Image (tube, rainbow, N blue to C red):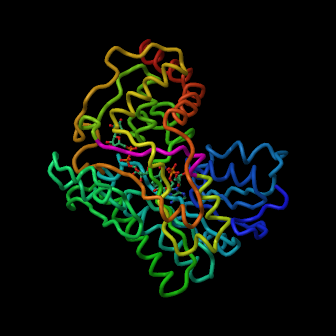
Amino acid sequence: MAGRVDLDGNPINPMTICMIGAGGFIGSHLCEKLMSETQHTVLAVDVYSDKIKHLLEPTSLPWNGRIQFHRINIKNDSRLEGLIKMADLTVNLAAICTPADYNTRPLDTIYSNFIDALPVVKYCSENGKRLIHFSTCEVYGKTIGAFLPEESPLRQDPAYFLLSEDASPCIFGPIEKQRWSYACAKQLIERLIYAEGAENGLEFTIVRPFNWIGPRMDFIPGIDGPSEGVPRVLACFSNNLLRHEPLKLVDGGHSQRTFIYIKDAIEAVSLMIENPARANGHIFNVGNPNNEVTVKQLAEMMTQVYSKVSGETPLETPTVDVSSKEFYGEGYDDSDKRIPDMTIINRQLGWNPKTSLWDLLESTLTYQHRTYAEAVKQAMSKTTTN
Ligand SMILES: NC(=O)c1ccc[n+]([C@@H]2O[C@H](COP(=O)([O-])OP(=O)(O)OC[C@H]3O[C@@H](n4cnc5c(N)ncnc54)[C@H](O)[C@@H]3O)[C@@H](O)[C@H]2O)c1
Ligand SMILES: O=c1ccn([C@@H]2O[C@H](COP(=O)(O)OP(=O)(O)O[C@H]3OC[C@](O)(CO)[C@H]3O)[C@@H](O)[C@H]2O)c(=O)[nH]1
């Protein structure tokens, strides 16, 4: 750890980082990395701490004192400004970011992703503090290619689907498709941050994650989250596999995604934190363009991998089709395809993802099986005996 230098060979000085949303999936991995590989101090802000409790206790851990947990709801807590003032850098991860909420809780979604982020931007700008704000690949919405006829050869041309920070438009559906409440709120906060940079000199970096997945993502319904809750696809499919039930393919599972292993993505965030001169003023796609699959292919691969890591035989019919209206309710819509252009992050930070989809699913599903299989078995046997 001693003598660590940045990408330009300058020594990295320890800094204090106010991390809002530190108790979530990405926050927990970022805290782990900062504690085990750097000398930085983290002021961890969240309403939950379960996913970072291994870092907070016992007090004898080598990073004792370098991470402090502040149970704060940023909607209504005057302590936030003080924490931002104490820090050199603020990383804002806090958000409602599960698609099942976008059309069913659109107001909460818009408040969480826009209104609640406003004071964070304001305090950083007024106090001359650097901000790394987490946006989303969803700001791109649908691809231009999605509007071409199905059989058009142009659909194969990257110009019609590659998502580039400085060139691609943001294409959302109509207002009644409330799915886009999240993407639209994220887009507006990006524009506000950009404007604070341009008009008031805010030092900012915007991160657009493309489907980061790995251990500790979301929850397993009825085990460590609500029974009727609908998490993101990795946890939905893990839940189906753990319960030995078919994986549900929304509208046939034709949508395409690129998935990246959380540990690869965290490397990129770490480079942004420690290389401000290269990261400030930029918007970065962070994804793995080599790991593209349809959701149906993802379901098939997860079924195969889970069988390998659990030793269980897959179901004869491993998937079942379900309409989006039935699964998510009225107002759902979808991004058709998401491949990140990597030009800017390559140029600024020289970063590339490493882990294949098969390998990341193998380590993630090993974790899911080890963490949840017994609890799911017990919960299921209770339901059948009652
Ligand atoms: N995981 C991904 O692939 C992905 C993709 C695109 C964008 N993002 C963005 O990255 C960020 C983090 O995502 P994640 O996957 O870790 O989600 P997450 O839900 O696991 O983490 C978000 C955390 O923010 C906290 N939070 C929310 N509102 C809060 C409030 N008012 N006060 C205090 N804490 C609050 C939550 O308790 C949670 O722990 C989000 O902004 C999300 O939109 C993530
Ligand atoms: O049981 C299921 C659950 C989901 N699907 C479909 O899978 C696709 C991906 O779904 P999910 O990972 O839940 O979410 P999205 O990729 O659509 O959106 C996320 O992207 C980034 C982020 O901003 C934060 O993580 C979030 O908005 C989708 O097509 C579902 O319909 C399924 O078939 N079965």
Residue at the spot 73% in from the left edge and 48% down from the top edge: 56
Along the line of sight, which residue is nearer the eye, 385 or 140?
Answer: 140
Residue 39 location, quadrant: bottom right
Q: Where 278 sits versus 258, above or below?
A: below
Q: Locate residue 91, reporting x and y percent.
A: 59, 64
**Image-based side of 212 in relation to 63, left or right:** left
Q: Where 171 sits versus 190, above or below?
A: above
Q: Locate residue 110, reporting x and y percent.
A: 37, 63
Determine if the magenta segment contains residue 260: yes
Q: Where 86 sits versus 56, above or below?
A: below
Q: Locate residue 156, reporting x and y percent.
A: 27, 50
Displayed-image quarter of ligand 2: top left
Along the line of sight, which residue is nearer the eye, 103 or 107?
Answer: 103
Which residues are drawn in magenta?
A: 255-265
Along the line of sight, which residue is nearer the eye, 233 or 280?
Answer: 280
Q: Locate residue 314, reporting x and y percent.
A: 41, 16
Determine if the magenta segment contains residue 186: no
Name the quarter where the N terminus is drawn. bottom right
